[in-house]
Image: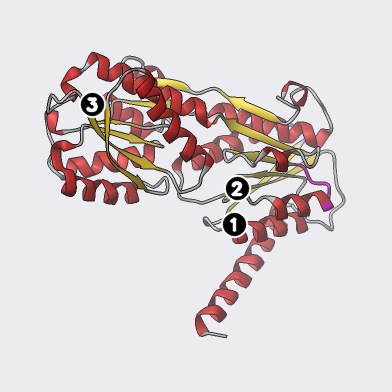
Amino acid sequence: MSKRNERNRKYKRVIAVTLMLTLLASGCEKEKPKSNNILRVGVVTYTQDDPFINAMTDKLKENFKEMESEDFKIIVSVKNGDDNQQDQNEIVEEMIDAGCDVLCVNLVDRTAPSRIIRMAKQESIPIIFFNREPVKEDIMQWEKLYYVGCDAEQSGVMQGEIVANYLKNHPEVDVNKDGKIQYVLLEGEAGHQDAISRTDYAVKTLIEHDVKLEKLSYQFADWNRGQAENRMTRLIQQYGKEIELVISNNDEMALGAVEACRKAGYRGNDWPVIFGIDGLEDALNAIKNGQMQGTVYNDNEDQASELAKLSVEVFRGDNKYRSQLTDGRYYVSEYRQVDEENVDEFLEK
């Protein structure tokens, strides 16, 4: 065995022990008798570096706190999979072994929930997947599996509509007056359902609105601001001021494009129009000051509220909210379009 592999094994053992101690200290202790007055929730995200997921997790913890009473306590343990499905599987296993009652899981790989489902099913622990939707065949294989999130297709359509409307009202975006909009597209990650849907439907919607497009480049930036800035910097070096439009699968990457344009010294018409998805506060401010032109608001507060309510309900065996779910499993939150006309409404939230 190489020294590197040995170090990795030691590191994972340390993480596992630390996680177990954290859960035991927080109250998710399997040896303690189960109580209807104490709900232990394990929340596992795909990474610690996604501002949208972090904001949703913070709101979820606030919602759980508000749902407590003198005779009902909720203990929440939050961990992340460090963008590695195997690591996330092991964290879920530790949470199950530590005795959590409900799992809220934001998958690293939406196509690979099988081990998590199998482990939870063995202990009859409900799972509410969120943000990254497993395929329907996986969700339907057990009655205690749920999903809370949005329709990625809708976000792509709405983004395309915002872009089309802006281009209609601002013909000066076509800087070279060739009757086409030269664009680049920043994609989340290869093979990710949301990235594929947002990309396909944004472009398809623009074409349906009779926008003539010329694709300069598609670039994967893994939903990350820093990576997007690097990709956009290289695109500026390659295409310069030919880039008239940037379509981004999320706001983090759109903000990376903004930073690249700023560092390139762009001003006025040199600056391409930039559109994202999520409605992050930084993006809303960028729309307010004209560095971005629009986004699609992904309501993390609504989704966090539904996660909290469902977690308590499945723990108690109630059916008020579950009876309203699509196919008894799905809660789909609605996106909203944001541009310079209504951005103040979202900033006030």
The residue beneath circle 1 is 85
Can you identify the residue that label 2 sits on?
107
Residue 9 visible somewhere in the drawing: yes
Q: Secondary structure at mark 1?
A: helix
Q: How is the image coloured?
A: secondary structure
**Marks 1/2: CA distance?**
7 Å
Residue 4: x, y in percent?
50, 80
Label 2 vs 3, first from the N-terminus:
2
* Residue at 58% over, 41% down: 132
Q: Amino acid at mark 2?
A: Leu
Q: Amino acid at mark 3?
A: Gly
| Of 345 and 278, the residue lying toward us | 278
Whether 283 is among the magenta residues is no
Left or right of 117? Residue 343 is left
Please give the range of residues in magenta: 122-126
The residue nearer to you, when weighing 310 against 206, is 206
- Residue ID at (51%, 51%): 47
Residue at image position (77%, 50%) is 120
Amino acid type, residue under disc 1 in the picture: Gln
Point out the image quarter for the C terminus: top left
- Asked which quadrant contains residue 187, the reply is top left
Is residue 206 toward the left or the right of residue 233 in the image?
right
Q: Mark 2 and mark 3: span between their CA atoms?
A: 35 Å
Instruction: Look at the magenta stretch and give its main secondary structure.
Output: loop
Check disc 2: other Cα within 10 Å, few if <14, some if 14-19, many if 20+. Answer: many
Q: Which residue is mark 3?
A: 290
Q: Earlier in the sequence, mark 1 or mark 2?
A: 1
